[in-house]
Amino acid sequence: MNIQESNTMIVGITGGIGSGKTTVANYFEKLGVPVYYADKEAKALMNRSKVIKRKLIALFGESAYKDGKLNRSFLRNQIFKNKGLLSKMNVIVHPKVASHFSRWLAKQNTPYILKEVAIIFENNLENQYDYIITVVANKQERIKRVMKRDSVSKASVLEIIENQLSDDEKIKKSHFVIRNDHLAMVELQVKEIHNRLINRL
C-alpha cells in the first residue's frame, strides 16, 4: 500500500450497494475519525461545478440536469445501457473529487482518516490507500435497504449488485471486513479496527 508522506494514514471504506458503508463510517466519526464521503462530494461537485455541468451535458445531453439539478435516475439509466459512458463520466468527475480530497486531507491532523468510496477495486484504486475496510451484509437485507432508500424495484437493485464486484472478491483484497447485519455487532467491530489502526496494528 501507498503510505503517505504525512503521518495521517488513508483508510478506504467500501462495500456493495446497500451494504451500509455510510452507516459504518458514521460509527468511526463518533470515535473522532474524520470521514471523507467521496460519492457524496462527487454528487455535490456535479451540482456545483459549472465546468462539470457543461461537460456532462455535452456527454449525456440536456436531460443530464433537471431544473438545474443533477438528474441521477436519467444518468443511471444511460450508464446501464452503455458502460462506456461511466468511464467517460469518471474522467470528468474524478479529477475534481481528487483535488477536493487533497485539500481536505491537508487540513486533517489525526492518526488516520476514512475515505468512503463505492468502487475502489472496480477502478483499481487500491494503491491510494494504506488500508481498506470492506463492509458486507446479507444480500436480501441489502436489496430491502436500497428499495426503501431509492424507491426502486428489486430487479433494478439486483442489476446493480450483479454489475459490482462480488463481496468474496472484495474481501480477498481488503485488510478488514465489517459484517453489517446487526448494528450492535457493527459498533464492536468498528471499535476493534479503530484501536488497531490507532496503534498502527
Image (cartoon, helix red, strand yellow):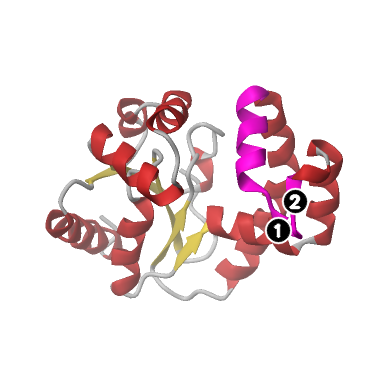
Please determine whether, in this image, residue 199 is positioned above or below residue 1: below
Please determine whether, in this image, residue 124 is positioned above or below residue 176: above
Q: Which residue is painted at 18% across and 61% down in the image? A: 187
Q: Does the magenta stretch include residue 167?
A: no
Using residue 86 as the reference point, say whether residue 150 is left or right of it.
left
Q: Residue 78: x, y in percent?
A: 67, 31
Using residue 92 as the reference point, say whether residue 136 is left or right of it.
left
Q: Is residue 76 magenta?
A: yes
Image quadrant in which the N terminus is located: top left
Under circle 2, the secondary element is strand
Q: Hey, what amino acid is under mark 1?
A: Lys
Residue 103 makes an appearance in the image: yes
> Disc 1 marks which residue?
69
- Residue 65 — which label? 2
Q: Which residue is painted at 62% across and 55% down in the image? A: 42
Please determine whether, in this image, residue 192 is positioned above or below residue 33: above
Q: Residue 114: x, y in percent?
A: 42, 60
Please determine whether, in this image, residue 182 is positioned above or below residue 25: above
Query: What span is in magenta?
Result: 64-82
Residue 133 makes an appearance in the image: no
Using residue 99 as the reference point, say whether residue 105 is left or right of it.
left
Mark 1–mark 2 CB contact (< 8 Å): yes
User: Viewer-proximal residue, 187 or 48?
Assistant: 48
